[in-house]
Image (cartoon, helix red, strand yellow):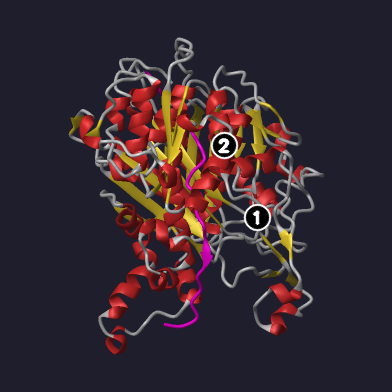
Amino acid sequence: MTDSPEQDYDPGDVAVIGMSLRAPGARTKEQFWDNLVHGRESVSFLAKDDIHVDETLIHSPFYVRACGVLDTYDKFDPSVFGISDRMAAAMTPENRLFLESAWETLEDGGYDPDRVTAEIGMYGANNPQTAALYSSPPDRVSVGPEAIEASLAWSPDTMTSNALYYMGLTGEAVTVAAVCAGFHYAVHLACQSLLLGQTDMAVAGGAMVRLPHPRGHLWEENRILSKDGHCRPFDANGTGTALSSGVVTVLLKPLAQAVADRDHVYAVVKGSAVNNNGVSAMAYGLAQPERLSACIAGAMEVGGVAPDTVSMYEANGLGMPMTDELEVHAASMAFGKQSGTTSIGGVKGNVGHGGVVSGGFGAVKAAMALYHKKLPATINLTEVNEDLDLPSTPFVPQLETADWASEAGIRRAGITSIGGGGYNAHLVLEEAPAAAERAPEAGGRPRLATLSALDDEALTRQRARLKDWLEADPGLRLDDVCFSLNLGRKVMPRRWAAVVRSRAELIAALSGGSPRDLTTETAAAPRVDAGSFPRGDSGIVPSGTDIQALSELAAAWVTGTQVDFDALHRGEASHRVPLPTYPFQPRRFWRTDW
């Protein structure tokens, strides 16, 4: 990233400036990445008592008790959004997960929904079947007006509009139905809207909860579900994949604007493309190589990306020889004849098949690989399927986690998603532009750091999480951290603030080890006269920048006075940086009838 908005950027480039993920075995994108680089499989093998389906089915010799379990599938924190418990129970699990994830991705990008005045597009995919399985919809005629409110919580169509409403945002709301390619379609539509100027930022993603949950699957010969519960992408002994659930959202903004706004950039969407097989399909639901190839090539062409510069290919990778062969053949046609320089991998070996969110798992894997400059291994790949004929393709299987060195001079990744019914989609991601050099942070300057939450327990958890985060990343600058906290988090009733001059002082303050006069919180704040401060349109501003002036400002803020944090940081060159998001305190909500 650069501080110079005049620098030339491709007008079609879209920055990924925030991400949120919950997947089997991972509640955050950081845990997900750690699982990938350490080769962990997050598909669980269940006891019969843990599965709530027909007894006859469970006792079938072909029933496979494997599942990518999402441990928060039935939990939600409605208080953050002002949602009643009654409405929370009426909302489908996918509606709830998407809402929390959209909140997290906005915070990860450093934006407070209360201070966002821009148009925010909301694009998301879900599984329409989940709503019917969660609870049969009400009969509007017999139930009366209450059914209208309940149906807005129940309906798959309103997932994205609910997210806008409960987060206090305005913009487009599009709920996508594109089967297992849903995440990619959501990103594709979001990028189009951004590039047309219809929205200023966009949240795109998908949510999938397979019901009943957890569950296994019934194995059938030549179907996509695995005989033993393990997914083995590109392996000669693969028999398919396992079912899983999850949620992924990303925050998007045109790259030039993201750089000008000093946003943190994980990766850049260079191009996207979608199509459908239509009548040309060899079999309804299977990839049609020519159509899939056209989709992959189209995404590269849109982004002006030469195939030999794409050094990571994240495949749909169902782990079934026939489908893997069709995909590799299609991708090879799109990439053309070149030497084998592109790593090929498949995340379904780690987490199974997440349906509409499966492409999101692959996209986050690719974005994090670009961000960390590392290629995770494809697990469960022990005997490469010779029928793939990989030596004659551009692709080399990623058998071990390795540092990512690109011969082309820039790192790029292609991510394919295929949906039943002929849906094809492809994204091309590129590493973020190099950050411009900044002068070292001036040492010893006092700065104000703020945190807030709905209650003291959540506030304590926030402090602990931020302390751990700072200790784990010694490269974070104090000015960036304070800027991101003060402007990128919703202000809530219970508050904590510290005036510090270094990262070490902030860590000590978060630990409760700093002098009392440098920290203050709602329960024990000294009273100050808010009328003694200069005031702008958005609240009071500090009368100075020394420790005393900032401490007085902190005391006023924690006792409920509105502070103009824009004025506090005006003239600085601070950047938004990822920090821990709000510590939701989820409770179980489940409905069996209306």
Q: Quarter of the image for the N terminus: give it.
A: top left
What's the mark number on residue 27? none
What's the mark number on residue 352? 1
> Quadrant location of residue 92?
bottom left
Q: Which residue is drawn at 36% across and 46% down?
A: 189
Magenta segment's dominant SS is loop
The front one of 137 and 236 is 137
Q: Which residue is drawn at 40% across and 22% down?
A: 547
State yes or no: residue 592 in magenta: yes
Report the amino acid beneath label 2: Gly
> At which x and y percent is residue 38?
73, 39
Q: Does residue 429 appear left or right of residue 37 in this picture? A: left
Q: Does residue 287 appear left or right of residue 153 in this picture? A: right
Q: How crowded is mark 2: few (under 14 residues within 10 Å), some or many (20 or more)?
A: few
State yes or no: residue 320 in magenta: no
Q: Residues within 10 Å of mark 1 (few under 14, many from 20)?
A: many
